[in-house]
Image (cartoon, grey):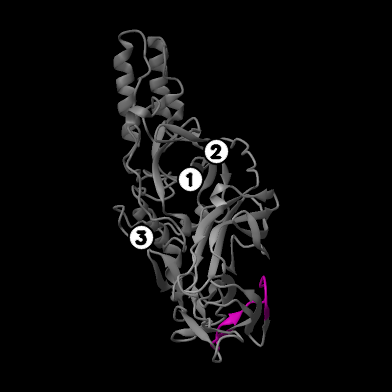
Amino acid sequence: MRGKLVSFGVALLATATVGVVQLQTKAAVDKTRDCDQYAVINCGTLSASELRAEYSTNNGSGQNGTTTKQNDIKKIFNSMGISGGELSGFKNGVVYQDGRVIVAGKTVATGAMMAARGLGGTAIAGTGASRVSVSAMGSAQTALVKMNGDRFVFAVMKPCGNPVTATPPPQPPQPQPQPKAECKSLSASKIGSGTRYRLSAAASAKNGAKMRAYEFTVKRNGQQVFSDTKRTSELRANTAFSATQPGNYTARVIVKTSEGPKTGQQCVATFRVKKPENPPTPQELTPGIKVEKHVENVKYKRVGVNVEFSYQIKVTNTGEVDLKDVEVTDTPEDGITLLESQIVGTVENNQWTYTISELAVGESRDFTLQAKVPQFLAGRLTNTVCVDAPEVPGNPDDCDEAEVDVPPKGKVLVCEPESGDTISVDEKDADSYPPVGSPQCEEAPLENPKAAPPAELPQTGPAETVLSVIGAMSLAGASAYYFASRRHL
């Protein structure tokens, strides 16, 4: 640090022979390690992996070329609102002496403040550092910049490991999306070899719009022969009817929504029933039902101890007759606790039950149950769901199951930044990894230096007194400043 300043003073005297000192139009941004008394992490952290290693070992890992112990690193970062679990997913950027933070040539924050050692400012209790404006450093430092989308969160200067906070630009007000609902489609399909037809309707709802009912109608040769209303908030509905007479049939559905009735040509279906050559032989229709069970949309999932997760249940009428009073029962193995904050049904003695009053041919109903495993239990835990319909022979008529397990005692789930996988690690090592759900820890390439604003000579130490007077000056002014800077050193 001292050698850099002396060399700069000599260069300044040499330019004075011309009579004027001119500001450099493009000075290099500091990218080298600062192993001095001002660095929060001695010798800095030039990559995210170095930062995590030195943070977790108090600068004792040796990855940055030094093992100088600094036991207050975590407390300094915490005082700046930065936790160990956030030290991933960085972009490369630059912090400038005037308080700007630049990423890919764009200003993402201003008014930067840093934690540093030996530069004055507001002391951080229990540490050897203070909170101080970045104007107390050299002209510019490369930095690891944490972003939430395009929103600045914090930065860490690479040469010295100094954490930085700053103010991102205000976000423009976002227009409130308007509720929207529409009828998406209607299809008509024959059920088996008889005269029964299934009508299947689909709708969409966005931004708070709600479904209220589906009104089905069928006309034969222009005369209405069938109508049915399904009152539901679901985005799909089904009904079935018998087309016993030959002719041209036109089916239509009108979706009643919070935004008014919705229909259209996409919600009209036509088909023709021919006159049979021989009268059909009466036949008995077959009932059927199926239930499917998943946990977080898979059949097996590792979950955290006492962490809430969800089961998905789907019940479908797979037969040829409408079903009534279909009973659904969900029974978890001991160790799994169902939560009682359910939309429908009841939870009693840790068992969930619900009765579907009507289930048309081809219709499905979906349910979501919340649960958790309050304490560690070895092995996989099974949750079984069963359905029983009076029209379907057997008891129960169908069952399905999903499994969960939890990490062993002393283990927690974290994100492995190199692969992006969820893994189990010891609790004591959890701070060295991002939390579950964090993005993969891939650093963006350093931006084009030509895109960055003009920068001055880089330092982490108190060289601003030298840089603040660079400009047009007389020979006498340049010489006086040189001798003053030597006294300061």
Mark 2 and mark 1 lie on one chain; the one further toward the N terminus is 1
Residue in front for this viewpoint, 256 or 445: 256
Can residue 80 be seen from the camera position used here?
A: no
Q: Amino acid at mark 1?
A: Gly
Amino acid type, callout 3: Gly
Q: Which residues are magenta?
A: 330-346
Q: 311 or 267, which is in the foreground?
A: 267
Q: Is 68 above or below relative to 27? A: below
Q: Quadrant of the N terminus?
A: top left
x then y, percent, for residue 306: 56, 76
Quadrant location of the C terminus?
Answer: top left
Q: Which SS class for mark 1?
A: loop
The residue tagged 3 is 60
Q: Position of residue 176 (x, y in %)?
A: 65, 42
Provide the secondary structure element on which disc 2 rests: loop
Q: CA distance from mark 1 to mark 3?
A: 33 Å
Q: Which picture quadrant has residue 446?
A: top left
Residue 157 falls left or right of residue 305 = left
